[in-house]
Image: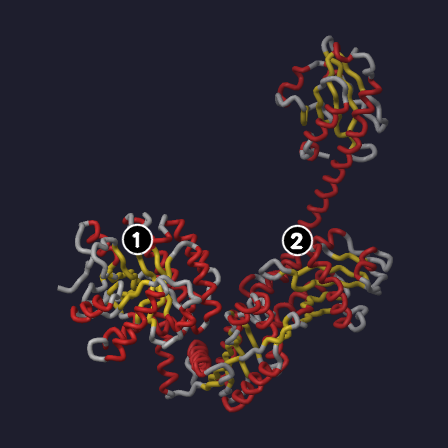
């Protein structure tokens, strides 16, 4: 054994045991076979070891034998007691010593025999640790050697080639493993997904391999998830056999395969006939390495939730389909499916139920398709299907069957029946299709059109359909929005909200989002908000507005002191469905030092009442942070005041369609007056928006409206400019048109 191995042991705990065992103070040393100090207990450093006593040097180490003899060295001041250390039965490697002053050594009851009885058990334990270190070093060297060999197996399965089709990569791996390991069978099994990849040796085939490995995987998987350990069975009498609960007439080695969430999802299995050589610990280590490679393939190719192909693999499948269409004149059908109520399932039953619904639909789709068809999970409740050698008419029939199967097979979740519905869009991949992107875009357009018509609908993309073409234009807006976000071309504007009460001096404004195009022109929200809503981009935009607004306010020193002013920020219906939004608001409020009572979040009436349960829960969570809430566009949906009393709002913002008409329309006037009166009875402040002239402003003031907003009060301007005007002491109606 080398000195480095001897020095690899942590002796501090052993020195503590020795110190507690002796009745007198002592210094403890570990020396190698030539007398060099490897470790010492004084804390002074090994360089001073010889200075403690020449007695240490006088211990005769060169004559050590396998006989366990206490050696004693002495000088005028100290006595050194030493026991030899052996790595094997006859390999001397050093000594463990106790150095005691000559004066203390004469203490009554202290003898060489007593010192030996204290040293001996510690020597035994140290030797065991040293031998274990040797064994581990040997295993590491062996594994390193085999790992280098294994790299040769992986030459054809590096990162780029891992992104193959479903069967190709895993089949290649099991075939390589069989050849390299020289075993009778190698299998990769995903029991929950009913997927097995198996390869067998040619000498003595294992009977019914698929049935066998499926059984082993199903029995072993719970143990792997609980302990994470590798299974090794060389004999029917092994303890692992009884733990599994099945008798396996083969030698078995199995390792867990983890998905990208570190969950055990599958099993890598090796099998040999009983007459073959046993599996050893080095084999366990090697199989663990191999299982990690399988997991890497899994991460590269498959969606961990459903076991279906992921987006990258599906793209390669579509590219092959397009090549075959162009080269051979073939027609394929592309389906894009939306599980529309998965968010409702998440909200009503929890995320675990939502995941179960996604998996449930995935299994229905897989069972329905031909072996030549391909399906992938694309995220957010969306699935992609390629129907090879299929025209749109045939694709419509398949889509209809899938829709009916999903509707007829609800999810059974913890004793509850959850109804599921899908919307489907179809597009053709044909010889004249320009690109995969065009086909995917067409299917997505059709899917979104079907979704807008209601769950369970099917839409087919056909060139020249004006509705679908309009939808395509909105898709282009999505790209423009994402591009503007990347290039930081969104801007925060604001518009004054003016109090009608005399003496109200604090600032109050609403934040507005604007987009600046590549030419520097400001784009109206009416152009980019509808496509952002349609394609679920509003949560991203809402969070950007919150972060940007708070950053600007914090830098300028506003909205940080209670009672100094108020900023209103709009929240979309999609954001209200985000359970994490209140936590995000809380983090950003703390990050920028914003007073929660200086912020009011505006929610439209239709959003609040359309998804009332989720919306109300989110609203209450925001309210609990100390923020204010405003119900925007009130009256537009003619909602009942009965619902209003259950909402934690502080402001009612009366819809502008009524405000504009109060001078000429008695009904509109009465509606505004009624909303204002009932709002005040409920202790709510009222805000009139779209106040576009002085006559409207005067009438609203006379009616008792609390706040006015519109061009007659102030035009929207950049937030930084508004704050600069406040700093300059200008009118709180900053931005008013002259």
Q: SS at mark 1?
A: helix
* Front residue of 668 and 418: 668
The image shows residue 140, relative to residue 699, as above or below, that is above
Mark linked to residue 552:
1
**Is residue 61 in sight in this rendering?**
no
Q: CA distance from mark 1 to mark 2?
A: 55 Å
On screen, residue 393 versus residue 546, left or right, reads right
**Is residue 74 in sight in this rendering?**
yes
Residue at 60% over, 65% down:
298
Furthest residue to the left? 738
Q: Which residue is mark 2?
A: 147
Q: Marks 2 and 1: in contact by CB < 8 Å? A: no
Q: SS at mark 2?
A: helix
Residue 592 image point, x, y percent: 36, 49
Residue at 37% over, 79% down:
472
Residue 113 image point, x, y percent: 84, 20
Residue 681 image point, x, y percent: 35, 65
Which is more N-terminal, label 2 or label 1?
A: 2
The image shows residue 95, relative to residue 600, as above or below, that is above
């Amino acid at each position: 054994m080398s000195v480095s191995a001897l020095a690899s042991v942590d002796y501090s705990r052993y020195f503590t045991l020795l110190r507690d065992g002796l009745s007198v103070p002592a210094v403890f040393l570990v020396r190698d076979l030539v007398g060099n100090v490897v470790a010492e207990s004084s804390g002074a450093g090994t360089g001073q070891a010889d200075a403690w006593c020449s007695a240490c040097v006088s211990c005769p180490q060169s004559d050590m034998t396998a006989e366990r003899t206490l050696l004693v060295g002495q000088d005028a001041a100290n006595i050194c007691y030493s026991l030899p250390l052996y790595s094997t039965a006859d390999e001397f490697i050093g000594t463990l010593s106790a150095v005691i002053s000559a004066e203390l050594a004469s203490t009554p009851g202290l003898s060489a025999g007593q010192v030996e009885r204290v040293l001996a058990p510690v020597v035994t334990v140290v030797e065991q640790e040293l031998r274990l270190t040797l064994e581990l070093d040997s295993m590491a060297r062996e594994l390193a050697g085999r790992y280098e060999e294994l790299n040769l197996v992986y030459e054809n399965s590096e990162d780029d080639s891992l992104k193959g089709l479903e069967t190709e990569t895993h089949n290649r791996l099991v075939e390589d493993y069989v050849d390299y390991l020289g075993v009778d069978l190698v299998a990769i099994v995903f029991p929950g997904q009913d997927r097995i990849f198996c390869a067998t040796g040619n000498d003595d085939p294992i009977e019914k391999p698929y049935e066998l490995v499926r059984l082993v995987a199903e029995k072993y998987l719970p143990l792997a998830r609980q302990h994470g350990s590798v299974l090794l069975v060389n004999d029917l009498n092994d303890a692992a056999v009884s733990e599994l609960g099945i008798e396996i007439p083969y030698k078995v080695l199995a390792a867990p395969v983890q998905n990208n969430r570190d969950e055990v999802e599958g099993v890598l299995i090796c099998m040999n006939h009983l007459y073959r050589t046993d599996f050893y610990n080095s084999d366990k280590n090697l199989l663990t390495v191999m299982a990690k490679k399988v997991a890497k393939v899994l991460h590269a190719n498959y969606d961990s939730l459903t076991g279906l192909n992921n987006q990258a693999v599906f793209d390669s499948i579509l590219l092959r389909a397009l090549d075959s269409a162009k080269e051979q004149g073939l027609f394929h059908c592309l389906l894009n499916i939306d599980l529309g109520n998965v968010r409702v399932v998440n909200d009503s039953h929890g995320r675990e139920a939502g995941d179960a619904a996604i998996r449930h639909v995935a299994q229905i789709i897989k069972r329905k398709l031909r072996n030549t068809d391909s399906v992938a999970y694309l995220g957010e409740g969306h699935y992609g299907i390629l129907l090879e050698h299929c025209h749109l008419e045939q694709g419509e029939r398949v889509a209809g069957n899938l829709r009916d199967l999903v509707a007829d097979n609800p999810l059974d979740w913890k004793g509850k029946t959850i109804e599921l519905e899908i919307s489907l869009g179809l597009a053709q991949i044909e010889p004249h299709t320009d690109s995969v992107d065009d086909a995917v875009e067409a299917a997505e357009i059709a899917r979104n059109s079907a979704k807008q018509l209601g769950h369970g609908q099917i839409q087919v993309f056909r060139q020249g359909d004006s509705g679908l073409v309009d939808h395509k234009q909105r898709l282009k807006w999505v790209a423009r929005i994402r591009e503007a976000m990347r290039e930081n071309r969104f801007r925060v504007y604001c518009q004054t909200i003016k109090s009608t009460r005399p003496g109200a001096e604090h600032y109050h404004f609403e934040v507005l989002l604007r987009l600046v195009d590549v030419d520097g022109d400001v784009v109206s929200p009416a152009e980019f908000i509808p496509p952002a809503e349609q394609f679920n981009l509003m949560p991203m935009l809402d969070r950007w507005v919150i972060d940007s607004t708070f950053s600007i306010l914090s830098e300028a020193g506003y909205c940080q002191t209670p009672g100094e002013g108020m900023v209103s920020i709009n929240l979309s219906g999609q954001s209200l469905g985000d359970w994490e939004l209140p936590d995000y608001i809380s983090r950003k409020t703390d990050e920028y030092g914003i007073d929660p009572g200086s912020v009011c979040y505006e929610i439209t009436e239709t959003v609040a009442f359309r998804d009332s349960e989720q919306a109300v829960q989110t609203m209450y969570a925001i309210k609990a942070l100390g923020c204010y809430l405003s119900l925007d566009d009130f009256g537009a949906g003619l909602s009942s005041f009965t619902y209003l009393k259950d909402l934690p709002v502080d402001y009612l913002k009366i819809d502008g369609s009524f405000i504009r008409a109060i001078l000429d329309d008695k009904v509109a006037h009465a509606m505004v007056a009624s909303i204002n009166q009932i709002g005040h009875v409920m202790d709510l402040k009222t805000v009139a928006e779209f106040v576009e002239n002085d006559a409207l402003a005067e009438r609203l003031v006379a009616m008792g409206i609390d706040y006015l907003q519109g061009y007659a009060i102030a035009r929207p301007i950049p937030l930084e400019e508004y704050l600069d005007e406040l700093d300059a002491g200008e009118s709180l109606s900053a931005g008013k048109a002259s």
